């Protein structure tokens, strides 16, 4: 049995953003219509090291995609000079269960997370949206910007990060790459970054809101992907209250998204304020944006169907172009 092993560089080459965005729409539609098989993720707490390992399986019949992602989050690694997150994705043959490929999960996760916001932006942002504000300057922020620029003709990018040095490095590295504009402005404050933004992307690990919701312009669209715990609140209550709220998966959002859990607990919103899952909009079951003045918010905590479809796309392209390394097991 041969197993194709794809490095991070292989994954980036085999998973173009436009293909990933199209794949996310199909995956979300299958999830929201009940065709996807996605058990709840399992979690193993590794007490001695203070870390956790998550196991995330999914099957997408329409894509013939079956995969399992294993992702470990060990905060203590920072003190050891190691990445705090490691991940790998195992793609399997749905017809036989045979392992087909092992993909580096960090690059895949970054691309599929960006692609989810790209899909949401394509469905919810105004067609003429041209100004984007990015909060955060890590790898997730990079793919958020790439995805938004893939689905809209972005002419102005403003970036805010607490790490000014990293923000300037981000701007220098991404300006003019692919669909990204030639200039990225590093803002001195959240308010400056937010000014007149048509699209806002938050990709931080902040426990507190990163911008004031009162500053959102009418008609803007927000992608919030940073917070993933009930105690994390990257988006303030004002933003949630003003927006038409769309999530990747209701059950996951209500269990993990502090951006929504906190205002629900405070009585600021009701569960019905979550208008739809993105897949319901893709499938035409629920309308999205209703007018050009409406604020829309896509809250994503990340779900396994994203990994399965991303792995399937990457494996298909890698096989056609002979990327990666074949290992005999």
Image (spheres, rainbow, N blue to C red):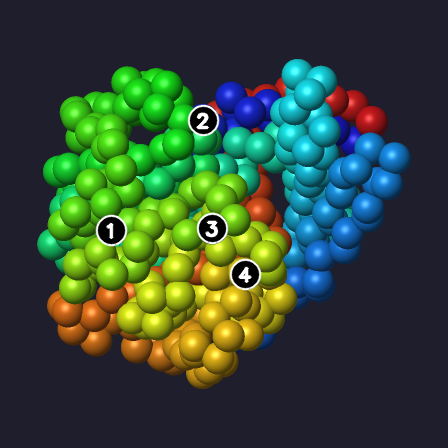
Q: Write the residue at 86% across / 41% down.
A: 47
Report the residue marked by disc 1.
Answer: 199
Tag in front: 2 or 3 = 3
State the separation of the CA atoms marked 1 and 3: 20 Å
Q: Earlier in the sequence, mark 4 or mark 2?
A: 2
Numbered-mark total: 4
**Between discs 3 and 4, the one toward the N terminus:** 3
- Depth order, front residue of 266/62: 266
Give residue 208's mark. 3
Q: Are marks 1 and 2 in contact (CB under 8 Å)?
A: no
Does 253 sit left or right of 101 as displayed? Answer: left
Q: Name the residue located 49 percent from the left edge and 37 percent from the top edge.
A: 110
Q: Residue 13 got which mark?
A: 2
Q: Which residue is mark 4?
A: 257
Single out the mark in the foreground, 1 or 3.
Answer: 3
Measured from the top left, where is residue 171 in percent x and y? 28, 24
Q: Residues within 10 Å of mark 1 (few under 14, many from 20)?
A: many
For marks 4 and 2, give the one nearer the viewer: 4
Can residue 183 be seen in the rendering of this structure? yes
- The answer to which quarter of the image holds residue 305 is bottom right
Q: Who is closer to the viewer here, 164 or 296?
A: 164
Whole-number angstrom distance, CA of label 4 to CA of label 1: 20 Å
- Dot 3 crowding, Cα within 10 Å, few <14, some 14–19, many 20+: some
Is there a contact, CB below 8 Å, between mark 3 and mark 4? no
Q: Earlier in the sequence, mark 1 or mark 3?
A: 1
How far is the residue under mark 3 from the one under mark 4? 13 Å
For marks 1 and 2, the one nearer the N-term is 2
- Which of disc 3 and disc 2 is earlier in sequence? 2
Contact (Cβ within 8 Å) of mark 2 with mark 3: no
């Amino acid at each position: 049995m041969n197993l194709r092993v794809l490095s991070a560089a292989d994954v980036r080459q085999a998973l173009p953003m436009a293909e990933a965005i199209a794949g996310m729409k199909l995956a979300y539609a299958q999830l929201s219509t009940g065709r996807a098989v996605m058990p709840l993720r399992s979690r193993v707490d590794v007490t001695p090291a203070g870390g956790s390992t998550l196991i995330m399986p999914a099957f997408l019949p329409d894509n013939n995609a079956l995969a399992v992602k294993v992702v470990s989050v060990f905060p203590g690694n920072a003190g050891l000079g190691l990445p705090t997150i490691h991940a790998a994705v195992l793609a399997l043959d749905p017809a036989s269960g045979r392992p087909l490929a092992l993909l580096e999960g960090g690059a895949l996760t970054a691309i599929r997370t960006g692609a989810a916001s790209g899909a949401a932006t394509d469905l919810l942002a105004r067609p003429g949206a041209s100004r984007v504000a990015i909060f955060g300057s890590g790898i997730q922020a990079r793919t958020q910007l790439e995805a938004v620029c893939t689905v809209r003709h972005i002419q102005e990018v403003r970036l805010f990060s607490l790490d000014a040095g990293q923000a300037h490095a981000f701007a220098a590295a991404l300006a003019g790459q692919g669909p990204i504009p030639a200039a990225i402005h590093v803002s001195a404050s959240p308010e400056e970054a937010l000014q007149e933004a048509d699209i806002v992307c938050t990709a931080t690990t902040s426990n507190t809101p990163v911008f004031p919701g009162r500053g959102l312009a009418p008609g803007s669209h927000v992608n919030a992907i940073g917070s993933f715990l009930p105690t994390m609140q990257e988006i303030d209550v004002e933003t949630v209250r003003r927006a038409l709220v769309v999530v990747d998966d209701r059950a996951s959002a209500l269990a993990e998204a502090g951006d929504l859990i906190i205002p629900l607990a405070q009585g600021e919103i009701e569960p019905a304020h979550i208008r739809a899952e993105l897949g319901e909009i893709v499938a035409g079951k629920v309308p999205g944006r209703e007018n050009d003045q409406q604020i829309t918010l896509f809250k994503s905590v990340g779900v396994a169907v994203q990994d399965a479809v991303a792995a399937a796309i990457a494996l298909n392209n890698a096989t056609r172009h002979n990327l990666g390394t074949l290992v005999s097991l």
